[in-house]
């Protein structure tokens, strides 16, 4: 297990909206920065509300995981940030399409007052490094 820190930026995910890497690894784990429902082409948040943003944010998270040599199935812990907890059920259905199998990661869902760029949802994750 490497104790060295390494950073990753995913070419298939939208550029970071601040001074941070898409992910960083240390001690056998990859820590992915939060992913919004931003289009990778730089055109902003995808249209279609929280469901469309959830799908895009999970696609972005998947791209970040892959850039770091992981898959979503390697997730140990996922945090979901929602601007409206009333969206929990619909987001949960979408989430279940990405984190399949008998052993899903640990997870927390938190309602927040605001997200960057007016996003409605954000996902961050910790992955076991391969």
Image (cartoon, rainbow, N blue to C red):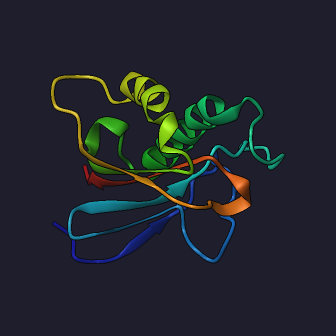
Q: Residue 47 occupies which quadrant of the picture?
A: top right
**In the drawing, does residue 100 fall left or right of residue 22?**
left
Count of marks placed on residues: 0
**In the drawing, does residue 78 fall left or right of residue 33?**
left
Between 84 and 50, the residue placed more toward the observer is 84
Residue 121, position in %: x, y?
A: 56, 47
Residue 52, position in %: x, y?
A: 65, 30
- Return the residue found at the far right: 43
The residue that appears at 57% across and 73% down in the rendered structure is: 20
Q: Is residue 115 above or below residue 95?
A: below
Between 4 and 55, the residue placed more toward the observer is 55
Q: Residue 129 occupies which quadrant of the picture?
A: bottom left
Residue 28, position in %: x, y?
A: 21, 63
Residue 130, position in %: x, y?
A: 25, 49
The residue that appears at 41% across and 22% down in the rendered structure is: 97
The residue that appears at 40% across and 30% down in the rendered structure is: 92
Q: Is residue 45 above or below residue 59?
A: below
The residue that appears at 63% across and 77% down in the rendered structure is: 19
**In the drawing, does residue 41 fall left or right of residue 9?**
right
């Amino acid at each position: 297990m490497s104790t060295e820190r390494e950073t990753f930026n995913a070419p298939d995910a939208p550029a970071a909206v601040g001074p941070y890497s898409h992910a960083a690894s240390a001690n056998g784990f990859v820590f992915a920065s939060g992913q919004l429902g931003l289009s990778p082409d730089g055109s902003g948040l995808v249209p279609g509300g929280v469901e469309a943003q959830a799908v895009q944010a999970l696609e972005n998270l998947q791209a970040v995981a892959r850039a770091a040599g992981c898959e979503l199935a390697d997730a140990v812990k996922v945090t979901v940030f929602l601007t409206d907890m009333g969206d929990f059920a619909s987001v949960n259905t979408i989430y279940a399409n990405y984190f399949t199998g008998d052993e899903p990661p640990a997870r927390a869902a938190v309602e927040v007052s605001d997200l960057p760029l007016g996003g409605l949802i954000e996902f961050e994750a910790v992955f076991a490094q391969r």
